[in-house]
Image: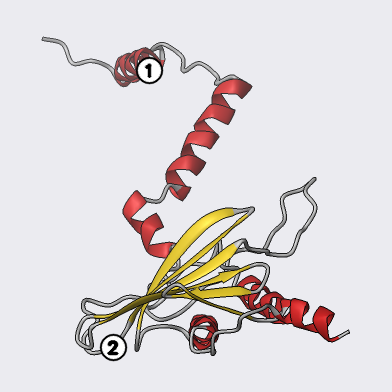
Amino acid sequence: MKRLSLFTLCLIAAVFALAACGGTPTPTPTPTEVIEEATQQVDSATAVPLAEIAQTIAIPAPGTLMPGSGVVTPGETYTPLTFDTVQLEIFNSGLGINYAITVYSDGRIVRDDTETFVSRETVSALAGLLEQIDFFDMQGIFTGDGVGSGNRYYLTVSGERGSRTVTADDGITPPELLAIISLVQGFGELSPAPTPPAAEATEAT
């Protein structure tokens, strides 16, 4: 067999090189395809597993009150919190205590079928305390595994915004909520009054 000349070898190499480059050309991506690919890359880079998202949600520690956002929906007029009734039920199994105190918007206080009265200013003060803690939208954990020797409180507020009951235990009730509970509890310890303060003032004049 004759040896191939250097020129022939170079020619054969050039043919193979051209054959290797002569495949199907890669199509140039369209602008739409580029945008879609970029979007997929961003979504993939910023995607967070649901488990990690759940860990970023702030959960208040037991005994800590977290008020609502306090944001008024656009187009709505802000109105102060009012109530028709505020009821506090106090339960203590160890001491055999179970009674309820109901405060009405007109100042009537009812405990165990015994009625007394407080002034409208006192009612307004109670409504103000409820508004300060954003009662209908606040969040928090106020109960433990067991009440133990302490009291368990059920505070229910009913009014134009509906009705909500918050349960709290001694030792885990935040001071803002405890102030309201103590105020209503004090109403239940008032001496019975035969007539409301407004009626007494009218009779005196």
At x 61%, y 53%, the residue is 161
**Towards the viewer: 202 or 106:** 202
At x 61%, y 57%, the residue is 159
Residue 165: image location, x then y, percent: 44, 63
**Towards the viewer: 203 or 161:** 203
Badge 2 or badge 1: first in the primary sequence:
1
Circle on res. 150? 2
| Colour scheme of the picture | secondary structure
At x 89%, y 84%, the residue is 205
**Quadrant where the image shows the N terminus:** top left
- The residue singled out by tag 1 in the image is 14
Q: Quadrant of residue 166?
A: bottom left
Residue 66: image location, x then y, percent: 52, 72
Q: Nearer the viewer, mark 2 or mark 1?
A: 2
Q: Is residue 194 above or below residue 15?
A: below
At x 29%, y 18%, the residue is 9
Q: Residues within 10 Å of mark 1 (few under 14, many from 20)?
A: few
Q: Amino acid at mark 2?
A: Gly
Q: Is residue 111 above or below residue 20?
A: below
Q: CA distance from mark 2 to mark 1?
A: 95 Å
Residue 55: image location, x then y, percent: 37, 63
Residue 134: image location, x then y, percent: 60, 68
Q: Amino acid at mark 1?
A: Ala
Circle on res. 100? none
Residue at the extreme left of the image, as rendered: 1
**Towards the viewer: 119 or 180:** 119
Q: Is residue 86 left or right of residue 203?
A: left
Q: Is residue 4 above or below residue 77?
A: above
Q: Is residue 60 left or right of residue 136?
A: left
Q: Residues within 10 Å of mark 2 (few under 14, many from 20)?
A: some
Q: Secondary structure at mark 1?
A: helix
How many marks the image carries: the answer is: 2
